Image (spheres, helix red, strand yellow):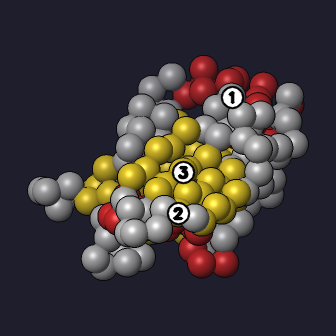
């Protein structure tokens, strides 16, 4: 996960980027053309998200533990947050987890994500349903998805209990034909 995000950030800084659910493509205009594709697991449906995540839980963010800039000259980095596990829906997480989340910085010094409605920035004092994947780089894991749950908790709990019950094992997005790197 970390490498896919870093690839996208690096490509954005140096060339043209196109991202879809099937992967991230980039072209680097520097004399010779280079085209690359990195396939990622299908993740548009709840059952795909639940299948990919090792932990799905109702959590409350207790604090922000810092911001890590992966590459200082490139936009974006990782927001580290500590989560109190209020209810595990999949997996057996400890009572508290510290996780990384890919974010960008705003001009006002805050944090933002490219999809705030489906991948909001985790804010202390708020409740979410999150799915995490293991990551040695980011302590207890990487935030694969997050859904606000300050209001409508019963609806979100039902949604994700159902998704976990019907989860689909990780699989490539059907639009992806494999990791491809082509240089001319």
Which residue is painted at 46% across and 56% down in the image? 27
Pick whichever of labels 1 and 3 is earlier in the sequence: 3
**Label 2 with label 3: CB-CB less than 8 Å:** no
Q: Residues within 10 Å of mark 3 (few under 14, many from 20)?
A: many
Disc sitting over residue 18 in the figure: none
Q: Is residue 147 visible?
A: yes
- Quick one: quadrant of the C terminus? bottom right
Which residue is painted at 31% across and 50% down in the image? 112
| Image position, residue 74 (x, y; %) | 32, 70
| Image position, residue 46 (x, y; %) | 69, 30
Question: 172 or 170: which is nearer to us?
Answer: 172
Residue carrying label 2: 34
Q: Nearer the viewer, mark 1 or mark 3?
A: 3
Helix, strand or loop status at disc 2: strand
Residue 154's quadrant in the figure? top right
Q: Nearer the viewer, mark 1 or mark 2?
A: 2
Residue carrying label 3: 25
- Quick one: quadrant of the N terminus? bottom right
| Real-space CA distance between mark 1 and mark 3, rounded to the nearest whole angstrom | 22 Å
Residue carrying label 1: 45
Which residue is painted at 66% across and 62% down in the image? 181
167 left or right of 153 in image: right
| Real-space CA distance between mark 2 and mark 3, rounded to the nearest whole angstrom | 10 Å
Q: Residues within 10 Å of mark 1 (few under 14, many from 20)?
A: few
Helix, strand or loop status at disc 1: loop
């Amino acid at each position: 996960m970390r490498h896919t995000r870093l690839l996208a950030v690096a490509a954005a800084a140096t060339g043209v980027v196109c991202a879809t659910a099937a992967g991230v493509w980039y072209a680097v205009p520097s004399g010779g053309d280079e085209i690359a594709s990195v396939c990622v697991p299908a993740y548009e449906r709840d059952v795909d998200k639940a299948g990919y995540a090792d932990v799905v839980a109702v959590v409350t963010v207790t604090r922000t533990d810092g911001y890590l800039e992966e590459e200082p000259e490139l936009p974006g980095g990782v927001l580290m947050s500590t989560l109190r596990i209020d209810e595990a829906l999949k997996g057996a997480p400890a009572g508290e987890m510290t996780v990384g989340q890919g974010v960008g910085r705003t001009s006002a010094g805050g944090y933002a994500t490219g999809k705030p409605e489906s991948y909001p920035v985790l804010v202390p004092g708020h409740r979410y349903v999150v799915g995490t994947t293991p990551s040695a780089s980011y302590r207890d894991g990487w935030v694969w998805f997050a859904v606000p749950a300050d209001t409508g908790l019963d609806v979100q709990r039902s949604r994700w209990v159902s998704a976990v019950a019907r989860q689909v094992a990780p699989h490539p997005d059907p639009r992806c034909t494999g990791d491809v790197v082509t240089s001319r």
